[in-house]
Amino acid sequence: QLQAFGGGLVQAGGSLRLSCVDSGRAFNTYDYGMAWFRQAPGKDREFVSAIRSNGDRTYYTDSVKGRFTISRDNAKNTVYLQMNSLKPEDTAVYYCAASQAILSAMSTESMYKYWGQGTEVTVSS
């Protein structure tokens, strides 16, 4: 029941903000840590960023640190990924996901129970 949106085509150096909404209310979003993963063409899906259920701690893969910011608004059942200084290598389909794992385990794909359908981000050089 997670829906991700906000992707699009942007030039290198530009910005996008992705949103992920639990539209179906199949679970209590505020009980779950949330994350973004991405899958580039021809590559495996990889972890991007995660945030704890109460939003007090975040976790980023090294390649996006300082450029991406994850946040959440539990009142709106929504998680955001603000992406700045985008690079062509950020081109991928971005997926949101929900997990009850501890933060240190949240980079592991198998820890996630719920997944969104993905939104495509294309960064041109």
Image: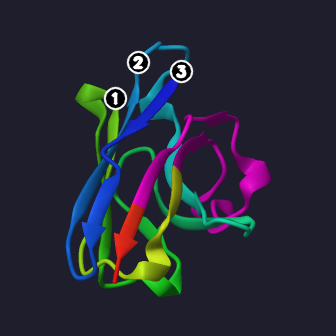
Question: Residue placed at 54% from the left, 19% from the top?
Answer: 27
Residue for badge 3: 1
Residue for badge 2: 23
How packed is label 2: few (under 14 Cα within 10 Å), some, or many (20 or more)?
A: few
Q: Gap between marks 2 and 1, in whole Å? A: 8 Å
Q: Nearer the viewer, residue 38 or 120?
A: 120
Magenta extent: 95-121
Mark 2–mark 1 CB contact (< 8 Å): yes
Question: Residue placed at 44% from the left, 44% from the top?
Answer: 53
Mark 2–mark 3 CB contact (< 8 Å): yes
x, y percentage for residue 80?
31, 49
Question: Residue placed at 46% from the left, 51% from the top?
Answer: 120
x, y percentage for residue 58?
41, 66
One can see residue 82 in this view: no
Give amino acid for label 2: Ser
The C terminus is located in which quarter?
Answer: bottom left
Question: Residue placed at 73% from the left, 69% from the top?
Answer: 43
Q: Gap between marks 1 and 3, in whole Å? A: 11 Å
Label 3 element class: loop
Examine the rendered structure and indicate whether residue 11 appears above or below residue 74: below
